[in-house]
Every structure is written in C-alpha cells, then in structure tokens.
Image: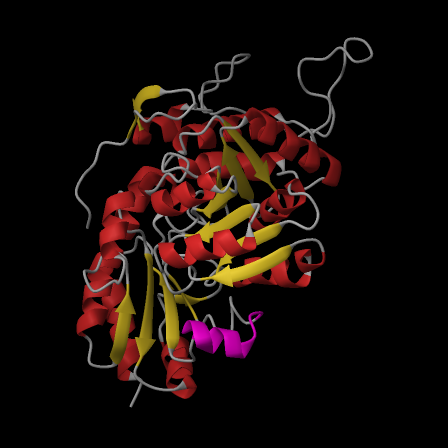
Amino acid sequence: MSKKITKKATTKTTAKKSTHDFATRVIHVGGEPDKETGAIMPPIYQTSTYVQESPGVHKGYEYTRSHNPTRTRLQECLASLEQAKHCLVTASGLSAEMLIMHLLPAGSNIICGDDVYGGTYRLFTTVFHKMHNFKFIDTTDAKVVEKTVKEFKPALIWLETPTNPLLKITDIVAVTAIAKKAKALTVVDNTFMSPYFQNPIVLGADIALHSMTKYLNGHSDVVGGCIMMNDDLMHKQLFTLQNSIGPCHSPFDSWLVLRGLKTLAIRMEAHQKNAMVVAQYLEKHPKVERVVYPGLKSHPQHAIAKKQMLGYGGMITFFLKGDIKKSNKFLSTVKLFALAESLGGVESLIEHPAIMTHASIPKPIREKLGITDNLIRLSVGIENVDDLLDDLEMGFSAIK
C-alpha cells in the first residue's frame, strides 16, 4: 500500500484552487445544500425543459440535453477532483471518446497506445478510421514516442496509463513534453486510477478522460463518461459537439454518480489495500506464471508509477500456468469474484480479456501484445480480503 498522502489542490493549473483535502471535496463540491429548501441532499432535476420568463430569458437552463442543474453539480465536483477548470459528463465513456475524435479536423493523425480498452480500439479502427489516421505504438518507451511523433506528425496522442489489461505505465510528463514540442494534444484515459491516485492534467495532459461507470460511480449501476480540461476554447467546442450530437448524461444517473463520489476517497484506499494483498498472494502462488500490478517492485514501470501516481489502484492482471481450459475452469469456480465485464465497483470482478473485454481486437494483435488465453484480469473490490483470498484459492484448487 502506498504511503499516506494528503491530497490538496496546490498545483499550478488554471483550475480554481481549493485548500480543502480531496476527501472533503468529494462530499462538498457540487454537494452544497439546496438553496430553495435547505435539503442536505440536493434534489434530482428530473426534467426535460424549463419555463422561460420571456422568449430567450431564462435562469441558465433551457433544455436538459444542453444543461441540467444535477449535471452541473456533478461537473463542478469532477473538475475539482481532477484539478481542472472544466468538465463535461456524457452518456458513456465511449461517447466521451467520440466527442474528442470529432474535435479534431478530418484527416488528423493520431498516435494511440498499443494496449488500450477493447472498446476504444474498436471505436478507432471500425468507426473513426474513415475520418482519421491511427498509429498504435508502445507509449511506455519515450524514444519510440518521440521518433513516431517526428515521422507521423500527430494532432493528438492518446494514452491509457495504466493500460487495459496489461497495466503498462506511461511517463505522462515525458510524453506530454514531447507532444507540446510538436504542438500535439494529449489525452489520458485516467479510468483505472481515478483522480484520487493520478491527475494527468497536473502532469501536463490537455485532457483527462474517465469512464464514470467504473471507480467514479463505484457501484456498478450507472454508465457514463467525463472529459476534463483547462482550455476555455476546447471546452466550448466540446460542449457544442455534445449539444449537437446529443450524448448527454441523464439527471438521475448524474445524481447517482454524485452520490457514489462521496465515498471515492475511502473506496480507493480500500481497493488498493486489498489489491496489494491479493497481488502479493498471487505472486507467490505456484499455479501463477506472472503477476502485473503497479505496486509490485516486479512491475517493469514500478518506478514511474511511484513517481506519477499517489497509489496503485485496484486492478491486477495475472497469467495462469496453463491453457484456455484451465482458465475457464478457474473463472467458473470462483464465486466472490463475479465473472463479469467492467471494473471499479465495490464488489470484486474477474474476467478473461481475450474472450470478453478485448475480443474485438484481432487475435494476432492480442497475442503480439501479450493478451493470451491464460491472462486473467481482476478488479479487486472492498470485501474482506481473507474471503477474497479463500475464493481465489478455491479457483486454483479446481485446476489439476
């Protein structure tokens, strides 16, 4: 587990600074009592439209696709947590990615990490490949990034760090410096870490992206995405795209995420505490070939993780000793680790990337990256860790 750190907003971003700790901001920013009634829990503005005093004269809200008071509160909270000036929340993580792709001029060159969420890969290679040019590279190697930037001249560099599912770590400071020199934008998908453990904009990124479905909401009952940035013009352009295309977040779902955020700080600490114990257990297990967890010294980029992250999160990838049959046996035996896609909920999940979340990536590319049939991904929840270890041991015992 990482050392205890007080998370104050004391960075040099252009975001509105706060002297309050992260654990205070998750509760109070956007969570102020209702002005009209004094309700400690702000109401859900479950409305589609708003009455105007006269044509074009209103109180800042016209139509919920454009603006909604509940969504406004959520955006204020998320911007504060990511230490950004602006935030837009969307109907899903992929719809947030779609808006960013539409932000770029047609024909733009985009460098993307070679190990990204399967849905991101699918979006780029089956939809936006007609509009932009993509090159997938190992962004953990700054020299490879620099060489590719000189040759490919990208408008944008797309990073996941840690990556999904191999948990590779990219040096955000190094890559964003290369991007700025080339006048390219940098997007960092920060879903795995949440703003509690990593702040890409503070480290130099232009945009921080999250699937709110995961750790931000934390209870596996909402789908949503969000985009954070400091640039005023970029915010205006992205809002115009969102308002025109329509992937807004519903008032009720925004309220649920606001509710979930209140426990983000304590949840992330619990996820990390359990994940470290599970990772150490797996690393010593005779039926495990290899474990990948940023908090382990055996992780290839552990030093970078320690430098740019305030903790190591709740995601673990490990390789069983065996083939697809043994993987299936293991996955179908465990019970507390629910066999399901997604991650970041309070409950522990387990999945097989090659068959499930990353099945849309062609098999030759998966194998080249190392997404093999014996690779298993864990989203470690906040249950009692001894119960989780017993559950995993039950799975291992089923493998002969």
Q: Furthest residue to the bottom?
A: 400
Q: Nearer the viewer, residue 200 or 388?
A: 200
> Could one spot residue 241 in this view of the protein?
yes
Give percent across and percent down for residue 91: 62, 44
Display coloring: secondary structure
Give percent across and percent down for residue 293: 28, 61
- Does residue 292 sit above or below 203 in this rendering? below
- Does residue 127 sit above or below 356 in this rendering? above
Q: Nearer the viewer, residue 43 or 323?
A: 323
- Which image quadrant for residue 142? bottom left
Q: Nearer the viewer, residue 343 or 116?
A: 116
User: Which residue is located at x 25 percent, y 62 percent?
Assistant: 299
User: Which residue is located at x 65 percent, y 31 percent?
Assistant: 237
**Which quadrant of the figure contains the C terminus?**
bottom left
- Does residue 40 sit above or below 217 in this rendering? above
Q: Furthest residue to the right?
A: 55
Q: Which residues are magenta?
A: 360-371
Task: Based on the picture, tell me whether residue 277 belongs to the magenta stretch.
Answer: no
- Which image quadrant for residue 331? bottom left
Q: Tell me how many marks there are.
A: 0
